[in-house]
Amino acid sequence: MEAQRLGLEAHGSDINPVAVLITKALIEIPPKFANFTPVNPDSRKNSLKTKIWYGVQGLAEDVRYYGQWMREQAFKQIGHLYPKVNLSQESGDAKATVIAWLWARTVKCPNPACGCQMPLVRSFELSSKKGKEGWIEPTINHSQQPPVVSFQVKSGKGKAPEPPKTGRGAKFDCLACKQPVDDKHIKAEGVAGRMNTQLLAIVAEGKNSRAYLQPIQKHEDIAHSAQPSWISHCSDS
Ligand SMILES: [Zn+2]
């Protein structure tokens, strides 16, 4: 960029394709469209005759126009998979955009007396920021067979409960019966396609900060109902 600024010819290389892409977008492509008028229909209609487009103004206008168009197309196709949430009154009671859905993977506890879907969680902490502490508190309903684990989001005074002792690698203790479960079982369940997911918490865009919300069944159902229209073929090699 410095070379370009001084009017010099520049050459560069990088084995990282991301760096190459960014540099192309920054250095190589814009000069090719320098002083071009935009081609999008809105700009053509409005200001083609009168406005003079300097530098990359025209290109920038097109990037904005078609970027917005792509955003709308994406929303039409997959927007229904990203429901908004209602924040509590103190957060303004508005519909908020979800930034993240926090999930735990689960496997069936091998203890025959238990058999719950045990969440594999290493930490229940959501935010350790002073004055904005938030955490997840698991509750276990033992009156059901197998026991059912659910999650509550807490904030204020207090701290995140320690997850049951976990070892190195994929070793977890069952939240319900406390039995240690070794990584062989967890791996075997995963390989057999029996690993599930459970929503831990929802992170939404609050008024001035992030808002943490309880899992919402509807959100969990929507996520589980989503079917990709294509499947990528990955391998471990
Ligand atoms: Zn168990």
Image (cartoon, helix red, strand yellow):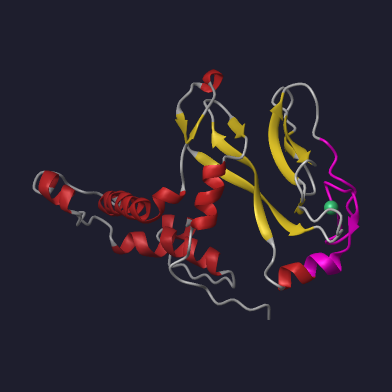
Q: Which residue is most to the bottom?
A: 237
**Nearest to the observer: residue 150 or residue 154:** 150
Q: Quadrant of residue 9?
A: bottom left
Up/down of 33 relative to 152, above or below: below
**Nearest to the observer: residue 50 or residue 113:** 113
Residue at the spot 41% in from the left edge and 54% down from the top edge? 78
Q: Is residue 118 left or right of residue 226?
A: right
Residue at the spot 36% in from the left edge and 56% down from the top edge? 77
Count how many numbered circles sit on residues in the image: 0
Q: Quadrant of residue 206?
A: top right
Q: Which residue is most to the left?
A: 49
Q: Is residue 145 left or right of residue 94?
A: right
Q: Is residue 167 visible?
A: no
Whole-percent x and y of residue 189? 75, 68
Q: Is residue 90 visible?
A: yes
Up/down of 29 relative to 83, above or below: below
Q: Which residue is most to the top?
A: 90
Residue at the spot 47% in from the left edge and 60% down from the top edge? 3
Whole-percent x and y of residue 72? 32, 50
- Range shown magenta: 161-187
Decide whether residue 181 is among the magenta residues. yes
Residue at the spot 11% in from the left edge and 48% down from the top edge? 45
Looking at the magenta stretch, what is its main secondary structure? loop
Decide whether residue 104 is among the magenta residues. no
Q: Is residue 139 left or right of residue 69?
A: right
Whole-percent x and y of residue 152? 69, 34
Q: Quadrant of residue 237?
A: bottom right
